[in-house]
Each structure stands twice: as C-alpha cells, then as structure tokens.
Amino acid sequence: MKKAFTLAEILITLGIIGVVAAMTLPVITQKIEKVVLKNQIKKSYSYLSQIQQKVMFEWGDALLISEGFGYKNFNDAMLGSMKIIKKCERDALAKGCVPRYIGLNLTQCSGFNETNVYYNKTVYVLADGEIIMPYNADWRSLWLIDVNGLKGPNKAGYDLFDVAFDSSNKRLSFRGKGCLNQGNPPPVTGGLDDYKDIEKW
C-alpha cells in the first residue's frame, strides 16, 4: 500500500512553490514589460521618422533653413500629418492630457520643466494614445514624446523621450537622457538613454 503525503509535507511543498514563484514572477513580469516598451518605442520612432520624411519631401529638403520657413512651421507641418484626437493648450495635467512624470528636467531645457509640461505647454494626444509636446527652439525642433500615453511607467528613458528634428540630420535624435533625467544621481536609472542603443537595452 502506497503511503500518502501528510498535510505537513503538502504545506511545505506548496510553501516552496510559493517562494519560487514570488522570486521569479517579478523578473518575468519586468522582462515582458520591457519587451512591450521596446516595441512601443520602435513604433513611435518609425512613425515620427515617416512623418518627418513626408514633410521633408513635400516641402523640400531645405525647408528648415529656407527663408520664412522656421521650426514653428515645421512643427505645424508635422502635426498636420498626424491623427490628433485631443489638444490641451494649457493645464494639460488637470485636463488629463498628461500624467505625472519622473525625470523631467528642472534646470536645463526649461521648455520641458514640470511647470511648462503640466500647466503651460500645448499637448497633443494621438489616436494611438501617444502624447506629443512640441517646443519651438531657434536652432532645431525639439519635442517631448510619451510613447504609450497615460499608461505607466511615465519615466524618462522608459516611455518618455525628447526627440530632436534638425536640418543637418534626417535621423531623429531620440533620447531618454538629454533634456530629461539630469542630476547626480539622475532621478531615473536603467532607462534607454539613446535610441541607437535600443537593441542592447
């Protein structure tokens, strides 16, 4: 006759399974979340690149440096090619256009400090939920992009990036650390600092 497991043995086994699950599930969840974020980042990069190329083609390669066509016009042309479903001209946080972010820069790139992002900037929400905040600099067009909208983690280098378009480079500058995440130590660690390193991230 086979000996049955005792209640104590069953409880010990279940306890061991529980401990192993508690140790491995967070790691698996983190890896899945990172894969999802990487795909969203790649999608955003590709979408913005296509819109930029379309605008450059329609207006000509010299549109950024031609007389009378500045970066505000470039931003307007870019936005005109996007599927915008919501626009918040001020008070974007209160109106639900942006979440609270970790890693906004308080000292450099003042156009993207907390006060401007939450209360002063014009914010656009696209059909896929992506959030876009253009900033008209004199020397290039600089945007703040949240690749997955109001969903978390809402951190620089994870779903929040600064994107620069300029006349000297058709390749986007897409960074999680530039105008964002400054400080010693920076407020966010482990994020993607530059799109060119996405496959290693």
Image (spheres, grey):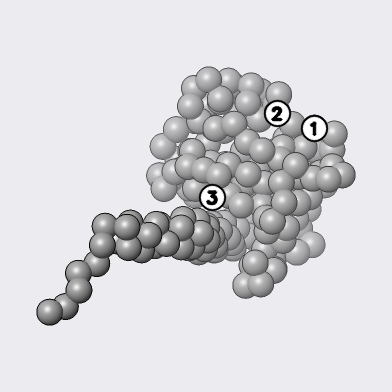
Residue 188 % position (x, y): 71, 46
Is 114 drawn above or below residue 104 in the view shown? Answer: above
Residue 114, numbered circle: 2
- Residue at x 32% of width, y 63% of height: 9
According to the picture, the residue beneath numbered tag 1 turns out to be: 106
Residue at x 61%, y 52% (from the top left corner): 158
**Callout 1 amino acid:** Leu
Q: Who's the residue at 16% across and 78% down the image?
A: 2
Tell me, yes or no, whether the two marked residues, 2 and 3, touch with CB atoms within 8 Å.
no
65 on left or right of 53: right
Q: Which quadrant would the C terminus be assigned to in this image? A: bottom right
Q: CA distance from mark 1 to mark 2?
A: 7 Å
Horizontal arrangement in the rendering, residue 10 relative to residue 81 (left or right)? left
Which circle's residue, 1 or 2, is located before the other in the chain?
1
Residue 107 percent location from the top left of the image: 85, 34
Label 3 secondary element: loop
Type of the residue with mark 2: Glu
SS for dot 1: loop
Q: What residue does disc 3 label?
A: 147
- Label 2 and label 3: CA atoms lie apart by 18 Å
Secondary structure state at the residue bearing disc 2: helix
In the rendered image, which quarter contains the N terminus?
Answer: bottom left
Between 182 and 20, which is closer to the camera in this rendering?
20
Distance of mark 3 from mark 1, alpha carbons? 21 Å
Q: Mark 2 vs mark 3: which is more N-terminal?
A: 2
Mark 3 / mark 1, whichever is N-terminal: 1
For the residues bearing labels 1 and 2, Cβ distance under 8 angstroms: yes
Sort mark 2 into few (<14), some (14-19) or many (20+) by Cα contacts within 10 Å.
Answer: some
Q: Amino acid at mark 3?
A: Val
Q: Position of residue 65 (x, y in %)?
A: 78, 53
